[in-house]
Amino acid sequence: MSMHRMVPVPEALEIVLTEAAKSLWFESGSASTLVSVSSDLVGQISAADIRVPSPGYPNYNSSIMDGYAVKTSDLVVMKKLYDGMDEKERGNFRIDFVLDGKVFAGDSNTARISSIDKSSSNGGYPTAVYVTTGAAVPNEYDAVIPVEDTKEAETGQIMCIIDDKIASVLATTKPWTWIRPIGCDIAAGSIVLSKGERIQPVHMALLAQCGVNQISVKYLPKVGILSTGNELLTSNNKDQCQGGKIPDANRPLLLSQLATYGNCKPHDLGIASDDVSIEMISDKLQNVLWNDGIDVIISTGGISMGEKDNMEQVFVEGMGGKIHFGRMEMKPGKPTTFITIDKESSDGTIWRKLVVALPGNPVSASVCTELLVRPCLDLLHHGVDVSEVVNSLDEQVFIRCAVDNASVHDELMATLRTDVKLDKGRPEYHRVSLERAPCPHDKLHYSYQATTTGVQRSSRVLSLRNADGLMMLPRGGKLGCGKDVAKKGEAYPVLLYQSSSY
């Protein structure tokens, strides 16, 4: 019989979060790393506000249209003349501009590529510069007339406004017409990525526009996944799956599951044989913790009460770990064990590593990773901003704040579509798929129905397929809720998977 007390899941989660918060306390709240901007950052958390440098974006006056950059002061003079004319005089009125050059997208606004003879006089005519969409408008010009409202003389040195467009051009062309002024899209000093914000694809474009090449992101904890057991094969070749051998489903399952969280870097630690000595396994894991920089170890198998279940000895006797709980009051996952391993450096700094030793059945391993590890990694990844806690920081205040504000599972109530037999020994975290429908008498709100994913054996990975969440069913029987079956139509809480669309 196990010497460990059976711990309810909420208590187990609080213990894990509390010990994770202590490791953050040892590290002064959180850690960050300076990295080059790339698409690999999508999903990570920014560790600092990113502000747009002066003068903002765009950093030059940019033409919105293909057309001609002009000075609105010239147009004001022409409008006064035009407004004072009668119909006959207007019919003979022309607005001509001498072309002062051409600026294409990518050219400097001072590098005018001109085809006119600079030695010739402009004859008193106003000047204009041909610009393409996105081109820099020379500084002395403050509006653009679209090319479709104009025509050029055959010489290419004179541009005039089309006769039937004169009235509308004079009436509508104001300063900054068809120009994006400096900083109009993103003002200087604007925050385009906030501290604590999850990086999205749009941020890649914003950082590029702002000329930011490096940013500080929250540290991603390194998580090592270790399988144990002589029965496990590294190959998926079914011809080898005989004589008591099975494929190692746990590592690919957990490595993939962790990769979807976006809060860690999963690492494959391989398979440990049951026949390898405690000393050899301990030495290997000590090396990955303290030399390879693994922050959290998740092991599967070898943690129950069998003759060859020696992982508790490895972590405690071989590596100096401390057990915080060794059994959980739940199905599946009862033998789950949580351990911390601390190491003090010569200057008194304490470094902490976390170990979650899970049962060997893949469903147990996956469910307990979802329940305990995901919130733990979220906390380690996001960290705690000590400047936002209190001015005079106390360790217990810090830890309480971290735990109280930790991100845990979203939850909703759902009704069962079929009867489900209750386990008389422990509460069950039953895999269910969900359907949403408008409430009959309130179309603005929704109700949810839950369908079991089938047989819930901890070895049956199919029970995870199509699961949207974990329905928390009470312990049945006289020692539990007093009934043996959760009836169709009864409502129970469901913890949602991160990938769920609900």
Image (tube, rainbow, N blue to C red):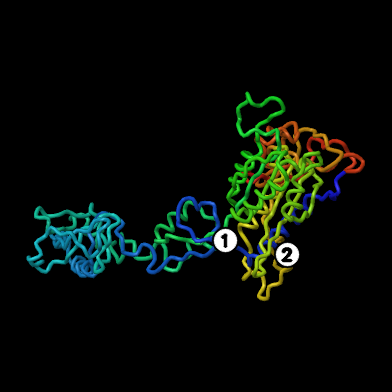
67 lies left or right of 263? left
Q: CA distance from mark 2 to mark 1?
A: 20 Å
Observer able to see residue 9: yes
In this rendering, is residue 396 above or below 500?
below
Q: Nearer the viewer, residue 312 or 120?
A: 312
Q: Tell me which amino acid carries mark 1.
A: Gly
- The residue closer to the viewer here, 171 or 493, is 493
Q: Which mark is residue 400?
A: 2
Foreground of the two, 357 or 341: 341
CA neighbours of label 2 inside 10 A, class few (<14), some (14 to 19), many (20+): some
In which quadrant will I find the C terminus?
top right
Q: Which of the 4 quarters of the picture holds residue 358? A: top right
Quadrant of residue 108 in the image?
Answer: bottom left
Q: Residue furthest left?
A: 120
Cβ atoms at labels 2 and 1 below 8 Å apart: no
Disc sitting over residue 196 in the figure: 1
Residue 295 versus residue 440: which sits nearer the camera? 295
